[in-house]
Image: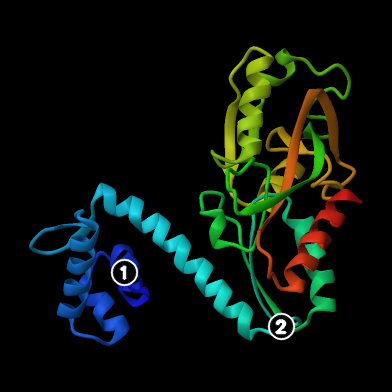
Amino acid sequence: MELLQLAYFCDAAETQNFSKTAKKYNVPPSNISQSVKRLETELEVTLFERTANRVALSERGRVFYTDVKRALTILERSRDALYNGEDEGCLKINIQVSRRLAMEAIEKFQACFPRVDIVTRHEPETDPMEFDLVVTDKRLNADDLVCTEAVSEDIVIAFKRGLLSENNITADDLKNKPFITMNAGNSLYEATREICGDMGFAPRIALQSEDPLYVRKCIELGLGVAFVPSYSWRGEFSSEVVLKKIGEYTRHIYVYRRNGNHLPSYLIALYEMLVQEYAK
């Protein structure tokens, strides 16, 4: 197996089109087809299912693609580390939760490392190995990552003043109220369902959004009630919004970084700044 051969394979797996891969690498389509065929012969497996108009990864091809993609990403990072100075480079960060605090840490970091570019994403369903740093409330099973639990915060009920009694909130008070939450798959969505389930009813979810700013705005407008994180969203509401603790429900936020013996110092610096920002 050769690196270029594996690069051809990964690109073809993503485009599902040998001609597009050939165009990207400026080679004839037959080069891509022959390269993939040699790879299949060497591995003694069929990586692609071929039809008249398209190619698609086989089941074994999908497994092989996942591992090869990770390996190529690690090699690319290692190459970049050789040529980047200790005070310049690029970091990829996946901020799945608590974006405001993470961005405050990034702002401080960039004042110290102005020549380091930051690329941020917010999607939860991504491979953590594609990133240098991950901020999430999920435990990730990845041996190549170092993890610190940055903070544990209460999940509280939030509502516009007057929408609910501010004392002794019961299941009867909540079960007929519209709920506002993040999209399905987000921890606040799951917490909403869990807490309401423990109180004996299914929540009537009226509004969902992937944007926490929109969720907070809907709460401010009195369009419903919501379960929110007490620490990450602290200071994000006006005095018209009431925050009340109901039971012992918490959310844990973790900061992950990739592991290695030759990481750039600026990566370690940002990792430590993120942890410190949440710990304040």
Q: Is residue 176 visible?
A: no
Mark pair 2, 1: CA separation? 33 Å
How far across and how far down the image is residue 94, in percent? 62, 58
- The residue that label 2 is drawn on is 88
Q: Residue at x 71, y 83 (%)?
A: 88
Of 265 and 11, the residue lying toward us: 265
Of 144 and 132, the residue lying toward us: 144
Is 82 above or below relative to 153?
A: below
How far across and how far down the image is residue 185, in percent? 55, 39
Q: Residue at x 24, y 80 (%)?
A: 22
Quarter occupied by residue 180: top right
Q: Is residue 39 visible?
A: yes
- The residue that label 1 is drawn on is 1
How far across and how far down the image is residue 172, in percent? 71, 13
Query: What is the crowding at mark 2: few (fewer than 14 residues within 10 Å), some, or many (at least 20)?
Result: some
Image-based side of 173 in relation to 278, left or right: left
**Upstream in the sequence, badge 2 or badge 1?**
1
Q: Amino acid at mark 2?
A: Glu
